[in-house]
Amino acid sequence: MKNNKEISMITAKAVKSSYEIGEIIRLHREKANLTQLELARLSEVGKTVIFDIEKGKSTVKLETLLKVFNSLNISVILNSPIIDNLGRSK
């Protein structure tokens, strides 16, 4: 597998659909020179799960999706007005 540090430097992106998540997973998998089966094994999930994610299927469990993100060194950052104001309201 290639060094994922160069892959993880892609600019942050606001994601609005499961299809976009699938595209990001596919892009990272291909840049890492991994097949769907190799990524599935690395993530400890079934091959059909990777296929489903990449096709934008919205029924994939969040825990499963996080395993795949971790395998590809993709960070998930949540941004919201409530989170941003947590430290300021005291």
Image (cartoon, rainbow, N blue to C red):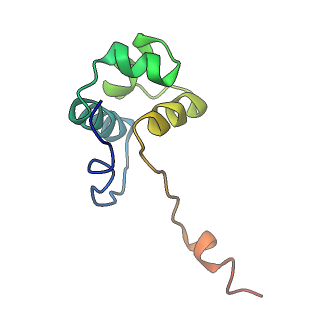
The picture places residue 83, in percent across and down from the top left corner, at 62, 70
Q: Answer with the quarter of the image where residue 12 lies.
A: bottom left
Residue in the foreground of this view, choosing between 15 and 64:
64
Name the quadrant of the N terminus. Answer: top left
Is 3 drawn above or below residue 58 in the view shown? below
The picture places residue 42, in percent across and down from the top left corner, at 45, 22
Is 67 drawn above or below residue 81 in the view shown? above
Q: Residue drawn 77% across and 88% down?
A: 90
Relative horizontal placement of residue 19, taking residue 85 as reference (left or right) = left
Q: Answer with the quarter of the image where residue 81 lies.
A: bottom right
Residue in the foreground of this view, choosing between 72 and 23:
72
Is 32 drawn above or below residue 85 in the view shown? above
Q: How many labels does the image show?
A: 0
Relative horizontal placement of residue 88, taking residue 49 as reference (left or right) = right
Q: Residue drawn 50% across and 58% down?
A: 77
The picture places residue 69, in percent across and down from the top left corner, at 45, 38
Residue in the foreground of this view, choosing between 53 and 17:
53
Q: Which residue lies furthest to the right in this view?
A: 90
Q: Answer with the quarter of the image where residue 36 lies.
A: top left
Relative horizontal placement of residue 47, taking residue 64 as reference (left or right) = left
Q: Residue drawn 31% across and 41% down?
A: 20
The picture places residue 32, in percent across and down from the top left corner, at 26, 33
